[in-house]
Amino acid sequence: QVQLQESGPGLVKPSETLSLTCTVSGGSINSYFWSWIRQPPGKGLEWIGYVYHSGSTNYNPSLKSRVTISVDTSRKRVSLNLNAVTAADTALYYCASLLCSTTSCAFDSWGQGTLVTVSS
Amino acid sequence: QSALTQPPSVSGSPGQSVTISCSGTSSDVGSYNRVSWYQQPPGTAPKLMIYEVSNRPSGVPDRFSGSKSGNTASLTISGLQAEDEADYYCCFYTTSSTLVFGGGTKLTVL
């Protein structure tokens, strides 16, 4: 399994852009889809989106207008940008590898998560 | 996206079996074996326990099993242990190639 480490600012101001990076180690970045998932304090998991090593993406329809996920295969990094943030975007943000078969996908490795608070 | 419904909480005593349900519709869970389950102990990241309804990744104890009946997928934990106390989430890979999580179930070991 790969190891994943999220990094980025822990505090973002309302209306600004949240930017996080996930560094991949211990495996090939070409073998998986790379996904972001978030968890507001005390609440459940919400899938944000994923990117393939080719750069193709898919996003949660509820966040699609504000999200961009990209991959830098040479540096083995996956990035998340979420713009126009509000307090509702305060959450623990996880990076996860999404392993897909011909019929289904599952998140088989997760980072430890990074807490992002939206506040002025 | 379609919602997956889980009970907010379940409980059981050590050694007992518990089952956590994940209800969808005939268009999603009922038609495809695309359900995965995740365990999240307090303060830790989720961990994959079951994929494609009933398959266990290597390293997951065989006390954990998955099944499906109609529009409902289920995770059963037999021989309950104190370390099984955690939040459990189901997840479905949709026909639009998106993913949706259930609301989560808190398992308490009495």
Image (cartoon, coloured by chain):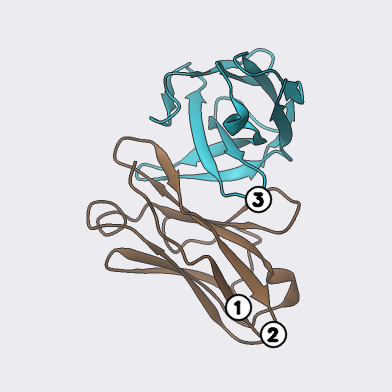
Chain colours: A cyan, B brown
Q: Residue at x 42, y 41 (%)?
A: B99
Which quadrant would residue A30 be assigned to in this image?
top right
- Residue found 48% across the figure and 18% down from its top: A66
Q: Is residue B58 positioned above or below B78 on the image?
A: above
> What's the distance in space between the residues labelled 1 and 2, CA to CA?
10 Å
Please state the chain letter of the residue tagged with numbered disc 1 in the rendered image.
Answer: B
Under circle 3, the secondary element is loop
The image quadrant of residue B72 is bottom left
Q: Is residue A18 above or below residue A103?
A: above
Q: Chain of mark 3?
A: A
Is the Cβ of the residue at disc 1 closer than 8 Å to that at disc 2? Answer: no
What residue is pinned by disc 2?
B14
**Comparing labels 1 and 3, the label whose residue is closer to the camera:** 3
Under mark 1, the amino acid is Ser
At label 2, the amino acid type is: Pro
Residue B27 relative to residue B62: left or right: left
Q: Residues within 10 Å of mark 1 (few under 14, many from 20)?
A: some
Report the residue that reaches farthest toward the front.
A120
Q: Tell me if mark 2 has few (under 14), some (14-19) or many (20+) residues whose alpha carbon lies within 10 angstroms of its own.
A: some
* Residue receiving disc 1: B11
Give the image quarter of residue A116: top right
Which is closer to the viewer, label 3 or label 2? 3
Q: CA distance from mark 1 to mark 3?
A: 19 Å
Any mark on residue A42, and which? 3
* Residue B56 placement, left or right of B109: left
Mark 3 and mark 2: Cα distance apart in space: 26 Å
Mark 1 and mark 2, same subunit? yes
Q: Which mark is residue B60?
A: none
